[in-house]
Amino acid sequence: GLISFRGVKRRFERLGMRGGAVWYADYAHHPREIASTLFTARAMAKSQGKRLLTIFQPHTYSRTKNLFSEFVSVLSSIKDLLIFKTYAARETYSEEGSAKTLCDAIGNAAYAETDEALKDWIDAHAEDGDFVLFLGAGDIYDRAERILSDRPETQNRKNGNTKT
């Protein structure tokens, strides 16, 4: 029944906790989807007096290039933002549609190309009670799950057990 419904995978899905921060993931990869997800995430964080940290992975160079100004507009409104390297799918590299070019245009965002850099950014910024939100249709979801499972003090969403 409704009481046992756990939600839709990759739609504002609670992944777990790390160091007191709650991690969520959402499939949003289009500017309008991102804006909608951010509206909800900001409301949740604000209602609890907490911060929202956002990690966004662009999905394809062509989409990023074609919707560049819309991405810049919606992502520029995020205070604590990391842009992760583009998930290319079947495409070849395009500087115009790259995550790095997007990050540079936003101006107030950090950029990462590796899981290690992603972990380091989260370690440096996430505090007890924060909301950490992973956005994108690429492999950012899998990266978030790997980081959660590799770290101490991680509460796994699947079984609720705390790993040490």
Image (cartoon, rainbow, N blue to C red):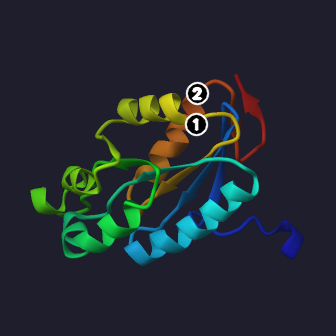
Residue at x-position 25% and y-position 54%:
99
Which secondary structure, mark 1?
A: helix
* Residue 58 % position (x, y): 32, 60
Quadrant in which the N terminus appears: bottom right
Which secondary structure, mark 2?
A: loop
Residue at x-position 28% and y-position 50%:
107
* Residue 85 % position (x, y): 28, 48
Residue at x-position 75% and y-position 64%:
6
Q: Is residue 94 visible?
A: no
What's the residue type where badge 1 is placed? Leu
Quarter of image, res 18: top right
Choose between 123 and 139: the one closer to the eye: 123
Q: Is residue 149 visible?
A: yes
What's the residue type where badge 2 is placed? Arg
Q: Which residue matches tag 1?
A: 148
Q: Give the side of residue 149 with respect to residue 128, left or right.
A: left
Residue at x-position 30% and y-position 65%:
72
Determine the CA span between mark 1 and mark 2.
6 Å
On residue 151, the disc is 2
Quarter of image, res 153: top right
* Residue 129 % position (x, y): 70, 40
Q: Are marks 1 and 2 in contact (CB under 8 Å)?
A: yes
**Image height of 94 relative to 126, above or below:** below
Q: Residues within 10 Å of mark 1 (few under 14, many from 20)?
A: many
Q: Give the side of residue 118 with respect to residue 54, left or right.
A: left
**Image height of 135 relative to 120, above or below:** below
Q: Give the side of residue 57 with respect to residue 143, left or right.
A: left
On residue 105, the disc is none
